[in-house]
Structures are given as C-alpha cells and as structure tokens.
Image (spheres, coloured by chain):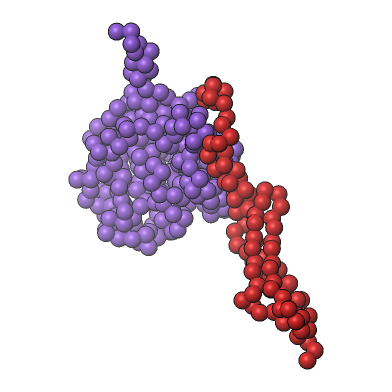
Amino acid sequence: MAKVLVVTSGKGGVGKTTSTAALGVALAQTGQNVVVVDFDVGLRNLDLVMGAERRVVFDLINVIQGDAKLSQALIRDKRIETLSILPASQTRDKDALTTEGVASVMAQLREKFDWVICDSPAGIERGAQLAMYHADHAIVVTNPEVSSVRDSDRIIGMLDSTTEKAKGGGKIEKHLLLTRYDPARAARGEMLRIEDVLEILSIPLLGIIPESEEVLRASNLGAPVTLSSPDSPPARAYAEAARRLEGEKLEVTVPVERKGLLARLFKGKS
Amino acid sequence: MSLFGSFFGRNTKTSAPVARDRLQILLAHERTGNGNESDLLNKLQAEILEVIKRHIAVDQDKVQVKLDRGNSVSMLEIDIEVPQQMRPSGQP
C-alpha cells in the first residue's frame, strides 16, 4: 500500500526541498516506485534540485484543472528508473490548489507509487495545509536554531489537528529530521544539542544531517546528494533515514567524513 | 556526542543552553492555545481598570501593562500613575 509522506517545517530555508530530493532518491534506489511532488506553487524548486528543470511541460495545477493528464505531468528521472517528479506551477499561486483537485491527484498517485513524497511550501497557510492534508507520515525538518524549533512546534500542532488523519481520529506519524547539524559546535555549547531539540519537540528522531559543503554542491549540480556523492556524510545520513522510514531499526548517529577521519589519523606521519 | 560533551564540559557561558531554556518557556505558553492568553490579559486589564476608575480618575495614557512569562509563573504588572490629589471620580 502506498505511503504518503509530507516534508514540512513551517520555517523556510531549513532544507525541505533538499531533504525531499535526497530521501526520494534513497527510497527509489531500493527499487520502490517513488514520486516527489512539489507543492510550492509559484515558487517551485524541486525540479531544479532534482535536475529536471528543463523537462517540465505540465505541472500539478494543470492536472488539477484538467488541462493535462497526470501521466503527462509526471517526469521520469533519467538516472533512477523508479523515481518520478510532479512539478509545481511557477506562474500560478497557491489559490489554484483546490481541496478536491489535490485529493484526486493524491488518490491517483497512491495507485501508481509505493511512496508519495510531498514537498511542502514554507509557512502555515493553504499551500502547507494542503501538502500535509493527505499524509500518513510527516517529516518535520528542523535546524538546531530557535526560530526553526519554534516553527516546527507550530507545525506539529497542525499535523495533529488539521490533517485528514487527525480529523478522522487517527494519528499522523511524525518524524524529526535535524538538518545542518554541527556536532563540534553543539559540543562546545554554541548550538542546540540533539537532546535539547528532541526534548522540546518530543517526536521520534528520523535522522541527523550534518552541515556539509556537499549539500550545496548537490543542488548546484541538480543531483540530490544521495546521488551526487553517496559516500558523503549527509548522503549516508539520508540513506539511513530512508531505511528507518521503511521500518528498519537503526541507531541514529551523525556520519562523519570517512577520508577526513583517516587524513586526521595519519596526519604528520607521512 | 556525550563523549564530546564530557570532554569539553558544559560551559555555562555558552549560548545553546540559553536557547533551550528560552524555547521551553515560550513553547509551554504557545502550546496552551494561541490567543487565549492575550484575551485573558486584555479582560483582566479592562476589568481591573474599571474597578480602579470607580475610585480614582485614571488617565488611560498613564497606565502601563507589562507581562513576564516565566516557566511556572507569569507576572502581570499593571502600573497606574495616580495623581497627587486623589479625586474620587464618583463624587464631585
């Protein structure tokens, strides 16, 4: 049965689109059928981060308004056969998203794919609410920083009250993805620690993505980090998070640079 | 992480614990329902002023309301400047 996942945060710029792309790749690499859906109508960027910006013909709004079939709007990833992207419209605004239209598209996607990953826009308005409405799971992307944690708390409240699951008396499964984490700064007391954020938000931890230059490099290239440098710490963190999403019980660690560690060990010996 | 932590010790001058404490206090209040608190405070302020006005002529501009939200206790402070000659407003 298909699982619908929303990647959300409240605050902008914390890594929702990056995480959507990286997790989408990681899940698809296991052979499952995955679609990543951009809900940021008017400010679409998932296509760019996925390297599909030149292949967009139709978008989510076209499908909702009946101007295109879903199959026409879906873009198949060139690198991973089982990965597709449904882009958002760049010329419209969030009012073009209708409740019925979104429901219909989500129902169709559930039939075609194993995983439907919805990249939410920032904010708590219509776009964000519709992105989370049909979700079974939510990934709350949070930076170890006060404004991000506060906004995540607000979003968690919305996940528990305004989603289809919540309204039906059920519970949406929430997961915390801590991004841009710097273990050294946290150890020095300059950055909120993992335990601090977990204690405050009290939802289970899906993964910790370390701050890394590889993430910007990946978006420069239009190849999610799990594809562009799969051995890098952020890519390994995303890959492990994807395995946890599939139900594997893995201890959460912060991956470190493999080469860097070796280089440090042998420093001065050569 | 705890290894790092014990290595360097928890420096009291660092900023992260401050961030954590501020967040905990703030969210404890926000979770109890947004807007309700300011409603309550507005009502309290209006009613307290009403009671005082029965006895003293109060200039609205000379009233200061401050709020300090603490971990377990919040402090609502209402400063009212009372004129030197207290003239009961009810009696001429």
**Residue at the spot x=57%, y=23% of the render?**
B6
| Residue A125 spot, x, y in % from top left | 45, 58
The picture's colour for chain B is red
Horizontally, is A84 left or right of A159 in the view?
A: left
Q: Quadrant of residue A35?
A: top left
| Residue A239 spot, x, y in % from top left | 40, 28
Name the quadrant of the C terminus of chain B: bottom right
Q: Nearer the viewer, residue B2 or A89?
A: B2
Residue that sits furthest to the right in the current view = B91
| Residue A190 spot, x, y in % from top left | 49, 36
Q: Which chain is purple?
A: A
The image shows residue A189, relative to residue B46, as above or below, that is: above
The image shows residue A9, relative to residue B42, as above or below, that is: above
**Residue at the spot x=24%, y=32% of the render?**
A79
Residue that sits furthest to the top in the current view = A269
Residue that sits furthest to the left in the current view = A54
Residue that sits furthest to the front in the current view = B84
Residue A239 visible within the image: no
Q: Nearer the viewer, residue B91 or A68?
A: B91
Residue A48 visible within the image: yes
Q: Quadrant of residue A114?
A: top left
All told, the count of numbered labels is 0
Horizontally, is A131 left or right of A229 in the view?
A: right
**Residue at the spot x=45%, y=28% of the render?**
A184
**Residue at the spot x=50%, y=30% of the render?**
A188
Q: Nearer the viewer, residue A22 or B28?
A: B28
| Residue A171 spot, x, y in % from top left | 57, 44
Q: Nearer the viewer, residue B4 or A14?
A: B4
